[in-house]
Image (cartoon, rainbow, N blue to C red):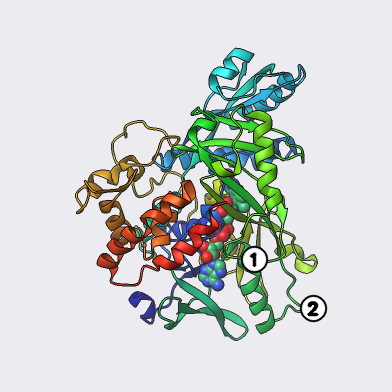
Amino acid sequence: MSSLAEPRRYDMIVVGGGATGLGVALDAAVRGLSVVLIDSHDFAHGTSSRSTKLVHGGVRYLAQGNIALVQEALRERAIVLKNAPYVAQPLAFVMPTYHWWDAPFFGAGLKMYDLLAGRAGLGRTEMLGRGETLEYLPTLRAKGLSGGVKYWDGQFNDARLALALARTAAARGALLVNYCQATGLQYSQGKVAGVLCEDTLTGAQHTLSSACVVNATGVWVDELRQKDGLAVPEPDGEATEPLVAPSQGVHMVVDREFLGSETALIVPKTADGRVLFAVPWLGKVILGTTDTPRQDLSREPLPFDHEIDFILKEAARYLRLAPKRSDVRSVWVGLRPLVKPPQHAGHKTKSISREHTILTSQSGLVTVTGGKWTTYRAMAEDVIEKCEQSGLIGRTRKGLTESLPLVGVGNTAMPTWSLALAPGWHSYGAEQDFVKTLPGAGEEICAGLTVAMVRFAARYEYALTVEDVLARRSRCLFLDARLASAVAHRVGDILMQETNTDPKTEAFLTLANQYVL
Ligand SMILES: Cc1cc2nc3c(=O)[nH]c(=O)nc-3n(C[C@H](O)[C@H](O)[C@H](O)COP(=O)(O)OP(=O)(O)OC[C@H]3O[C@@H](n4cnc5c(N)ncnc54)[C@H](O)[C@@H]3O)c2cc1C
């Protein structure tokens, strides 16, 4: 915050610290640009901590015939797994089949997935017999099961990957500030010249200067776009049309025994034609997701009852041990920024076919939204190219993040462990030995969380509140909301010692209540 107050002209200001903004900030910093990134909440507070946790090419896109998108995502999948192996790893998936024609149909599609991945492939697709399928997924309903198809994709800890991006960008000279909201833009002769922002904890106001401002605020991009459109209207005088039509996705977490496996289950077609996953993650199982249009843009969207019922009903169709409402440990909701490019944007709209959209407004504000976590790096390169083409920054060299190990990756190969297992010291990758040197390494707050880890979060991972620690540094809120509530005061006390600011424990308890059914 004190660095923000210094009068300085940056090459680039990034607004929004989710996957998209953090990817852009890191790419820009690695290219030698001076960058500041602000987020109104915590890094990855929005959609980027609420994904299905898959680093994937997207079998759904394959089914839609979107080959270019799948190929790009498969390439990026390999890069993520290589650059952050302690937060992103390969995961085997089994798609059970119940009709004789399912196996050749899905098998052929998934073999195509292998072919598209080429050297970036993680393992061969295999056709499984009925017995093998049940070995991989012991809790699967056996009635009518004919076999299955096993294929490989990746999984990750989304909020911790976001942190690794933030900390790597900071190590490359970028300034990253959470709890700082962009409240408006500054202009010089009709062109964007900076961002007005407010420290949401103290109310202090700052002005940041740069000709290049990237609006990477996810589903919230229209707030800044519309302010910009009022200040500097488009030449045709049309009001700035909203770009985002939000749609929500619900996930539920249940105990490991409901799946009883380190292999994920994928149901290729639910009753409403979607894909349903049961993914082993950090010692529990994630079930999801839904796709429900919303009109509002809540920071903490709540699930609809029909979404909960739908996931439980679909899970019960496939799992012998069907989870009930009372078995759900945590339920969380993410908002997808479905992009509908404005009619009049014409040539200024880029890459719609690749899922993300980049727009430059009349004033030079660059907005990016859509896409997926897996392709954050490719999106970042596209954004920087767009800034260069628009003359907002000079030419730089791309591709530098392709082989850039993130903070937490050591020089030597790390021991193998699985993201399907409960969190612990291994969640810190090469930094685990250092975390263990902090006071309280032997004091466990709950399984997988020690006093030393909370101190590390406060000292090195930008954590300020109980929510930062329990939702995104440790994933306790996402794994077991009642347990998170039970340990909140203890975490708050440690944070208070570390930061001497209010850790907002009561607000966290109210929030955690929303994650319980
Ligand atoms: C249900 C669901 C499941 C998904 N699963 C997967 C998956 O398994 N794999 C995958 O690859 N992708 C997945 N995705 C997609 C992926 O999660 C998103 O594409 C990605 O997280 C979007 O990141 P973002 O940075 O654009 O948005 P966000 O993460 O929402 O970040 C935007 C940030 O902007 C900040 N902000 C907003 N307004 C302001 C302001 N005025 N000033 C400062 N900051 C501001 C917010 O606080 C927020 O942190 C999923 C998406 C959903 C919804």
Q: Which mark sits nearer the N-terminus, 2 or 1?
A: 2
* Marks 2 and 1, how far apart at CA: 28 Å
Q: Which residue is mark 1?
A: 297
Q: Position of residue 76 (x, y in %)?
A: 54, 42
Type of the residue with mark 2: Asp
Camera-side residue of 340 and 280: 280
Could you say which quadrant of the image residue 216 lies in? Answer: bottom right
What residue do we see at 36% from left, 43% from top?
A: 427
Camera-side residue of 393 and 358: 358
Camera-side residue of 214 and 179: 179
The reply to whether residue 358 is visible in this rendering is yes
Q: Position of residue 320 (x, y in %)?
A: 61, 26
Q: Which residue is mark 2?
A: 236
What residue do we see at 60% from left, 55% from top?
A: 334
Q: Residue furthest front?
A: 326
Q: Residues within 10 Å of mark 1 (few under 14, many from 20)?
A: some
Which mark, by number, is residue 362?
A: none
Identify the element where label 2 is drawn. Answer: loop
Camera-side residue of 49 and 261: 261
Type of the residue with mark 1: Leu
Q: In the image, is the residue at mark 1 within 8 Å of ligand 1 by its beta carbon?
A: no
Give the vertical position of 436 relative to 339 (above or below): above
Q: Residue furthest bottom?
A: 189
Identify the element where label 1 is drawn. Answer: loop
The reply to whether residue 378 is visible in this rendering is no
Left or right? Give the position of 443 relative to 292: left
Q: Residues within 10 Å of mark 2 (few under 14, many from 20)?
A: few
